[in-house]
Image: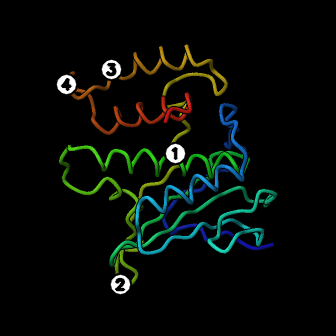
Amino acid sequence: MSRLDWPAGFERTTAADRERNRSFEATLGSTTSELATEMGRMEVDEWRGEIANAHTKSNGLPLHNANPDDPGFVLRWTDGDEQFAVACDASPKLRDNVRYVLKWVHETRMRSQRPVKTGDSEFAAARLPPGDGGDGDVVAGTATSQPAHEVLGVAPDASEDVVEEAARARKAETHPDNDGDREEFQRVVEAEEVMTDGE
């Protein structure tokens, strides 16, 4: 059995806290195909997926029948001189973790195409610290911070109507125009998209 090279400083989800996302209906094969397409759209220098066993394609993405004991998934890429990584192990199913990463990459890439100016790139949260003497304790952003249903305060298998109603209420509470927290508002938006499988 291979061991998953989890990024330093990224917290792991305990097996007891992993929750299956019942709204994902895509297969592992179609999910990895979508992720490969998404990475091609980003036009990064190189990228690689990682799982905890050898059932992978040449790009490190899992084969359709991969079923490692550790369901975690790590996606790493380089763009110029910078290295990035996102990781997810929130679900006991590898497919769900790969899909969470796919959704995060897609949503972040889409935000980067908006004509909105921010202080840094949309992918800054995934930037890894420099390997040559950099601060190894810096925690990069991950796709594992909190399950979408917890962000919205709904059951993991809540209906789309319940999810949308909860998201509407949470967005009103957290909207920056109402003195809410911009990051929390964005987390609510992303959680709604994850739970409704929105594109």
Judging by the rendered image, the residue that carries numbered circle 2 is 133
CA distance for labels 2 and 4 = 41 Å
Q: Are there few (<14), some (14-19), or many (20+) residues within 10 Å of tag 3?
A: some
**Outermost bottom residue:** 132
Asked if the residue at tag 2 contacts the one at tag 1, i.e. Cβ–Cβ closer than 8 Å, the answer is no
- Find numbered disc 1 in the image and state the secondary structure of the residue it sits on: helix
Percent across and percent down for residue 32 are 64, 56
Q: Are there few (<14), some (14-19), or many (20+) residues within 10 Å of tag 4?
A: few
Q: Is residue 12 left or right of residue 130?
A: right
CA distance for labels 1 and 3 = 24 Å
Tell me the tag on residue 177: 4
Asked if the residue at tag 3 contacts the one at tag 1, i.e. Cβ–Cβ closer than 8 Å, the answer is no
Where does the N terminus fall, quadrant-wise? bottom right
Judging by the rendered image, the residue that carries numbered circle 1 is 103
* Residue 4, image quadrant: bottom right
Q: Is residue 32 shown above or below 84?
A: above
* Residue 43, image quadrant: bottom left
Asked if the residue at tag 4 contacts the one at tag 1, i.e. Cβ–Cβ closer than 8 Å, the answer is no
- Sooner in the amino-acid sequence: mark 2 or mark 4: 2
Amino acid type assigned to the residue bearing label 4 in the image = Asp
Q: Is residue 28 left or right of residue 121?
A: right
- Find numbered disc 2 in the image and state the secondary structure of the residue it sits on: loop
- Sooner in the amino-acid sequence: mark 3 or mark 2: 2
- Sooner in the amino-acid sequence: mark 1 or mark 3: 1
